[in-house]
Image (cartoon, coloured by chain):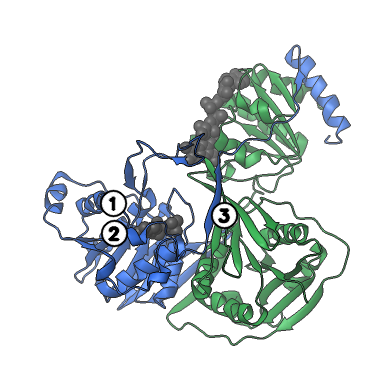
Amino acid sequence: MSKPELWVIAERRLDHIEPTTQQLITKAKHLAGDAFHTVVILFEANNDHLEDELTAYGPDEIRIVRDDRFPTATDAEHADALEQLVHKYQPNSILFGATITGRSIAPRLQAKLQTGLTADCLDLRFDDETLVATKPSYGDNIMCEIICPDHRPQMATVRPNTFVAETTPGEATVTTETIIFHPVARLQVKAATPVVNTATTVGDATRVVALGRGAAGAATIDTATKLAEKLGGRIGVSRPLTDQERFTHDDQIGQSGNTIHPELILNFGISGAVQYLVGMQGSQTIVAVNADKDAPIFDVADYGYVGDASAFMSALLDQFV
Amino acid sequence: MKIVVCIKQVPETNDVTIDPVTHNLDRRGLAGVMNPFDKNAIELALHLKDTASEDVQVALLTMGPDDYAESLREGMAMGADAGYLLSDRAFAGADTLATGYVIAQALKKIGDADLILFGRQAVDADTGQVGPIVAEFLHQPQITYAASLRLSGKNEVTAERLLEDTKQTLVAQLPAVVSVRSELNTPRYPTPRNIQLSFDKPLTVWHHDDLDLDDSRLGQAGSPTIVTKVYAPKPVKRELTPLTGTPSEAASQLITALKSRQLI
Ligand SMILES: Cc1cc2nc3c(=O)[nH]c(=O)nc-3n(C[C@H](O)[C@H](O)[C@H](O)COP(=O)(O)OP(=O)(O)OC[C@H]3O[C@@H](n4cnc5c(N)ncnc54)[C@H](O)[C@@H]3O)c2cc1C
Ligand SMILES: Nc1ncnc2c1ncn2[C@@H]1O[C@H](COP(=O)(O)O)[C@@H](O)[C@H]1O
């Protein structure tokens, strides 16, 4: 008997693959072991080759459906195409990125298939062939494990940057599939323009200098900027600092901001509220400086200094040559 | 023109705890309030009502226990014209699919809504799924996470949707389903006069038998997903190496440590 299929729905962003897709492929491979066949579903135009951005992550198969209408297809058109593939292949489970696109197409497909969909998951595992999805609720204050025992496929959207993409050796088989494209006449995508985003975001940085209310003075922020430059990193902030003119919501780390996994994060004057911690506790090396020895940030730190954030930061900068 | 806004009532605070004995959510004493994101949807509907050249009727729709009527009253005090409450024991325990089904059946009974509006997500469950599910059940086009929306012609709306790094402009022929981003507007407060007026506005309650329903699609039985476990997230505790002494001494210890980890 052939293995059950575990699907990752590839998402495009203008001319590229949205990074969550690659993260999900890596996670799907870990979940699959030898028990599942991992398949990436990719919709693209006839002359596109977005699969080139996926092969290195090593899914068992990349199944491509080509149509020049896909790059500007609407949610309902994507869901319709997916429904046709689901009927043909009967996958066990389908994973989407919990991006705006994923969160828009997945529930539409769910309604067509009348099956279960768990939103914005932070973890996934299989108990035999049952997908156990962990999702936060009540603003990440509560975690729930959710299953969909009696309906297939099992579906989940997964929060971006929850897993880390890893390339692997090994070949992915690339196949093509056809569907009947049913255009929805009553909704047209008139234009899609890139939103200019000059700086790299805190989510992309491998080194992050994070500032909280205890490191919010203008001079401290200047020192932190220099430190971030020396480290080849970027500044991130806890929520209170987004009120400052120098920072925006895009710089915020945490539940209602960015989830990040840098190699190194230095936290200055941040207490370590759960809503902050969920956004950064997957970082590889965590350093915390806080005047309060009982600050919860120390519970997740590898290195900690109890003292003044600004003084420590200046001393650190001085010792960088 | 007829607009229906779907709203949900949620606990007043997200600071819920787990009962250590039953391992269930402890929601005791939590008052219900209207899902804040749904106020943006109501505000959009009222803005269209204030500015459109034609007559616009705004109705609110919610499925839930009888106390959800409070949120309907609040929305009518903001300026909506009517409210519908879908309340029945048979609807309880519904996940997004079963919720979407009942809402879609109620919308069919209300009939000929030109625009059906949703909030971006309910702050308790955080899914944002109900809007697209209803759109699919009603075979209508959907615009999710609208960052702006205007009437752009007879039976036509133009909306902008902000994806992670792309801005889309979409045009939909009505009827259509739209879910809105909170950045779209700032919801108005009820005025004393509107609060007064709201008590005379019609609030219709529909129970199970008032709607055309397939019982196998309701409540827990009609919900494919099951919550098997609820728990409070625990941060992963790491082995903390203290940095000690003066800031300068501590900084030098850190530099040594980061070098050994090949981070600098
Ligand atoms: C639904 C919801 C979502 C949220 N989402 C987020 C989110 O995404 N991101 C986020 O960050 N927050 C979020 N919050 C807010 C969060 O709960 C905290 O309020 C916030 O993270 C606190 O930021 P802070 O640590 O900078 O400030 P504080 O909690 O005020 O902590 C400041 C710290 O600095 C220390 N300190 C003070 N002076 C010094 C000094 N001179 N030197 C060294 N240390 C000093 C203090 O000891 C203290 O520990 C959210 C809250 C809710 C309810
Ligand atoms: N029980 C309900 N009754 C009416 N509308 C609802 C209900 N649940 C959710 N909605 C609507 O669907 C949106 C998304 O909710 P959710 O999918 O639960 O995150 C909300 O912002 C409401 O507009």
- Residue B68's disc number: 1
Q: Are marks 1 and 2 in contact (CB under 8 Å)?
A: yes
Q: Is residue A55 above or below residue A214?
A: below
Q: Is residue A18 left or right of residue B249?
A: left
**Residue B137, above or below A306:** below
Q: Colour of chain A?
A: green
Q: Residue A146: which numbered mark, if any?
A: 3
**Snapshot quadrant of residue A98:** bottom right
Q: Is residue A102 left or right of residue A164?
A: left
Residue at (84% x, 27% y) in the render: B257
Query: Which of the four quarters of the rendered structure image does ligand 2 lie in?
Result: bottom left
Label 2, secondary structure: give it.
loop
Q: Amino acid at mark 3?
A: Ile
Locate the C terminus of chain A and report the quarter of the image it occupies.
Answer: top right
Callout 1: few (<14), some (14-19), or many (20+) C-alpha neighbours within 10 Å?
A: many
- Marked residue chain, label 1: B
Q: Nearer the viewer, residue B224 or A106?
A: B224
Q: Which chain is blue?
A: B
Disc 3 on helix, strand or loop? strand
Estimate the x, y position of residue B101 in percent, counting from the top left. 40, 69
Residue that numbered label 2 is attached to? B87
